[in-house]
Amino acid sequence: MIKLIASFCGVALIVLLVGAYLAPDDLAKCDVSPSDTPGCQAADVIVAVSGGDTQARTDEAVSLYTHGWAPKLIFSGAAADKSGPSNAEAMRERAIAAGVPEDAITTEELSETTRQNAQLSSSVLASNDDRRVILVTSAYHQRRAGLEFRSTVGANTQIVNHPVQHDNQWSQWWWLTPTGWWLALSELIKIVLVYVGISR
């Protein structure tokens, strides 16, 4: 019985650690709007990358914009279906429908991988001299996306991680589904590949 309890506690600890590791949230201690609290200041721009539950990522970026976290949005991602509009354009249209002015939105429509999201978005950030960037993606993807962006933007640009906590692929109960485990394990492998210089 003691071994069973110990095994259960061990699995529970692993689940908690994996979930926390994959989903760093630099705004977790902040209020709904920016403030003078260290780490909770407004940013220059919010970048949301497509993939997974793209609509949830868009909605989180729009929510941050609406609450004054940044005056601009960048949506990054190529078309999943090459016969239709890019993911970035679909995100733009959704944001406009939610009330975001068109001139507050920039799209990057060529990237097909997380590394490309970082590289191509970084060019936009550099051209606008954006120095503090809130990065939005799904919780399981946040750690890797943050690593890719930080390695690309340079030391003078701060990347602030802020994941979507719940979407149609991931929640705090991710460990109860095969999809959750597949996403978690695949992200951990991809993070290792980032560290050894082989990423996508």
Image (cartoon, rainbow, N blue to C red):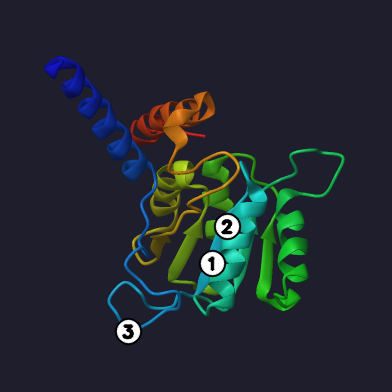
Type of amino acid under label 3? Asp
Q: Nearer the viewer, mark 3 or mark 1?
A: 3
Residue 185: give x, y in percent of width and height: 42, 26
State the CA–CA distance, disc 2 to disc 3: 24 Å
User: What is the distance, in whole Å, between disc 3 and disc 1 at their CAs?
Assistant: 18 Å
- Judging depth in this view, the residue of 131 and 73 nearest the camera is 73
Tell which circle, 3 or 1, labels the residue nearer the N-terminal end: 3
Query: Would you call the spot at circle 2 few (<14 residues within 10 Å), some (14-19), or many (20 or more)?
Result: many
The local crowd at label 1, few if under 14, some if 14 to 19, many if 20 or more residues have their Cα within 10 Å, is many
Q: State the mark number for residue 46.
A: 1
Indicate the quadrant where residue 113 lies: top right
Q: Which residue lies most toward the left here? A: 2
Q: Is residue 70 above or below residue 190?
A: below
Instruction: State if disc 1 and disc 2 touch (CB < 8 Å).
Output: yes
Q: Amino acid at mark 2?
A: Ala
182 sits to left or right of 96: left
Mark 3: secondary structure: loop
Residue 130 badge: none
Q: Which residue is mark 3?
A: 36
Viewer-closest of 118 and 126: 118
Q: What residue is disc 2 on?
A: 48
Q: Is residue 126 left or right of residue 55?
A: left
Q: Label 1 sits on what residue type?
A: Ile
Q: Position of residue 146 (x, y in %)?
A: 42, 50
Residue 66 pos. (x, y %)? 59, 76
Q: Secondary structure at mark 2?
A: strand
Residue nearer the viewer, 7 or 42: 7
Residue located 40% across and 27% down the image: 189
Q: Residues under labels 2 and 1: Cα distance?
A: 7 Å
Q: Is residue 143 above or below residue 74?
A: above
- In this rendering, position of residue 12 left or right of residue 24: left
In percent of the image, x 42 and y 31: which residue is there? 175
